[in-house]
Amino acid sequence: MRFLWATIGLVCVGLGMLGVILPLLPTVPFMLLAAFCFARSSERLHNWLLSHPQFGPAITDWQDRGAINARVKRISTIAIAAVFGLSVIMGVKTIILGIQALVLCCVLLFIWTRPDY
């Protein structure tokens, strides 16, 4: 079972690394999932991820306080607005736009109700 958790964690780290390059692929949720998996499989990998200079602070802030950085909240809001704007420009059907707007509003509500750090 530890092998499975470690494998899932490594896949999540890979997807998170892709998220650094690809603008619409989220990085931090994959790193949070990787930390969760590594905590169940490998203390060494878990410690490596938590001590990583780029990913570690966001993970520990989330684990300790459920907090999201205010800068990240602003960037997320801009990205969400851009995605919705792109859907409007592309002429997506109204029903799909409505569903997308509802889901994206729920995501924004979640993001902005988390404490800052």
Image (tube, rainbow, N blue to C red):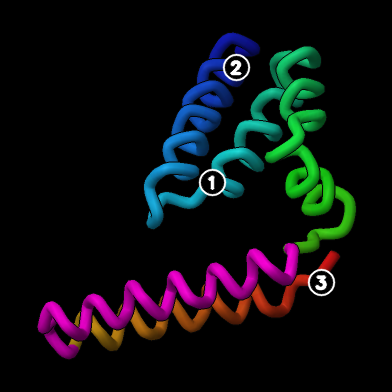
Q: Is residue 15 above or below residue 89?
A: above
Count of labels in the image: 3
In depth, the one of 71 and 45 nearer the eye is: 71
Amino acid type of the residue tagged 1 in the rendering: Thr
Q: Nearer the viewer, residue 103 or 67?
A: 67
Residue at image coords 60%, 20%: 5
Question: Looking at the picture, which amino acid does disc 2 mark?
Answer: Ala
| Marks 2, 1: nearer the viewer | 1
Q: Which residue is mark 1?
A: 27
Query: Which of the image's four quarters has the N terminus?
Result: top right
Query: Circle 1: is it few (<14), some (14-19), or many (20+) Cα within 10 Å?
Result: many
Q: In this picture, which residue range is highlighted in magenta? A: 69-94
| Cα separation between marks 3 and 2 | 30 Å
In the image shown, does 92 or 18 lie closer to the viewer?
Answer: 18
Q: Quadrant of residue 101?
A: bottom left
Labels 1 and 3: the sequence-earlier one: 1
Circle 2 residue:
6
Above or below residue 94? Residue 117 is above
- Magenta segment includes 90: yes
Q: Are marks 2 and 1 in contact (CB under 8 Å)?
A: no
Judge left or right: residue 66 versus residue 30. right
Q: Is residue 89 magenta?
A: yes
What residue is disc 3 on?
Answer: 115
Horizontal arrangement in the rendering, residue 60 relative to residue 22 (left or right): right
Looking at the picture, which amino acid does disc 3 mark?
A: Pro
Instruction: Using the image, tell me which numbered label, if any, was put on residue 72.
Output: none
Is the residue marked by circle 2 packed among few (<14), some (14-19), or many (20+) residues within 10 Å?
A: many
Sequence-first tag of 3 and 2? 2
